[in-house]
């Protein structure tokens, strides 16, 4: 293996991406380049490569644990975060297996938690989009919603959002009624549910 390029990481003054035989291999700190005798145009020995790999495995595992302490994440979101940090695919998968072995990553549990904690605030469509942005699959999102999100939850969310907009069905003008209806429908709620919750029967569908 030959070190063909050492590239400073964008936005960092201390991290460098190392290329071996023309391919991106790993990211090291500046002091580690000296420690492992890494220079462009020079070979990287098997022992040094093995030592770097062992170090990066430990570092990726610690990074994964730290990220999960900061916030619950899906497996895909955690994978992306580690990959963006410059860890090789093999080491990313090793770190994921490590945290999963302790039950720290469980996509189904995460999806259930998100739905349970937010179902009184969002429409089903909004929740599904949120789950997908978290890196959960469409199947996992739909399963969690089918399990926990009911029509009563949708109506409760409508009620809360209408109250947040200071909507008063007794004093609102027809134009204000149409406006709140349009707002809630745009957020993904069924028109019939909206109409029932805010008790307005004279809107135009």
Image (cartoon, helix red, strand yellow):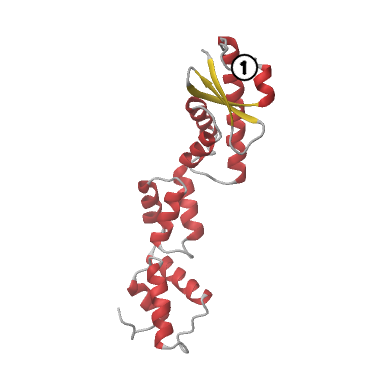
x and y percent of residue 132 in the render? Answer: 42, 50
Q: Nearer the viewer, residue 192 or 55?
A: 55
- On screen, residue 115 versus residue 202, left or right, reads right
Q: Does residue 56 appear left or right of residue 186 in this picture?
A: right
Quadrant position of the C terminus in the picture: bottom left
Residue 71 location (% of width, % of height): 58, 46
Q: Nearer the viewer, residue 185 or 102?
A: 185
Relative vertical location of residue 183 with respect to residue 94 in this rendering, above or below? below
Helix, strand or loop at mark 1? loop
- The residue depicted at 64 percent of the width and 16 percent of the height is 36
* Residue at the spot of label 1: 38
Can you name the residue that lies furthest to the left here? 205
Residue at coordinates 58% horizontally, 41% vertically from top-left? 68
Q: In the rendered view, would you say 157 is above or below 33?
A: below
Q: Position of residue 125 (x, y in %)?
A: 38, 60
* Count of numbered badges drawn on the protein: 1
Q: Is residue 191 above or below residue 114?
A: below
Question: Which quarter of the figure has residue 44?
Answer: top right
Could you say where residue 77 lies in the image, as x and y percent from the top left? Answer: 49, 42
Q: Residues within 10 Å of mark 1 (few under 14, many from 20)?
A: some
């Amino acid at each position: 293996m030959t070190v063909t390029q050492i590239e400073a990481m964008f936005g960092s003054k201390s991290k460098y991406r190392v290329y071996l035989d023309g391919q991106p291999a790993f990211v090291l700190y500046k002091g580690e380049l000296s420690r492992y005798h890494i220079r462009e145009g020079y070979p990287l020995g098997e022992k040094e490569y093995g030592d770097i790999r062992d170090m990066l495995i430990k570092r990726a595992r610690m990074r994964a644990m730290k990220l999960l302490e900061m916030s619950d994440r899906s497996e895909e979101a955690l994978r992306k975060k580690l990959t963006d940090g410059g860890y090789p695919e093999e080491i990313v998968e090793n770190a994921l297996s490590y945290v999963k072995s302790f039950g720290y990553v469980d996509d189904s549990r995460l999806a259930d938690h998100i739905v349970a904690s937010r179902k009184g605030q969002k429409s089903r469509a909004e929740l599904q989009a949120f789950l997908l942005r978290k890196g959960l699959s469409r199947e996992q999102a739909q399963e969690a919603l089918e399990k926990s999100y009911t029509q009563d939850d949708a109506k409760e969310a409508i009620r809360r959002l209408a109250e947040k907009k200071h909507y008063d069905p007794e004093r609102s003008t027809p134009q204000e009624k149409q406006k709140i209806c349009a707002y809630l429908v745009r957020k993904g709620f069924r028109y019939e549910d909206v109409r029932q919750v805010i008790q307005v029967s004279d809107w135009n569908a």
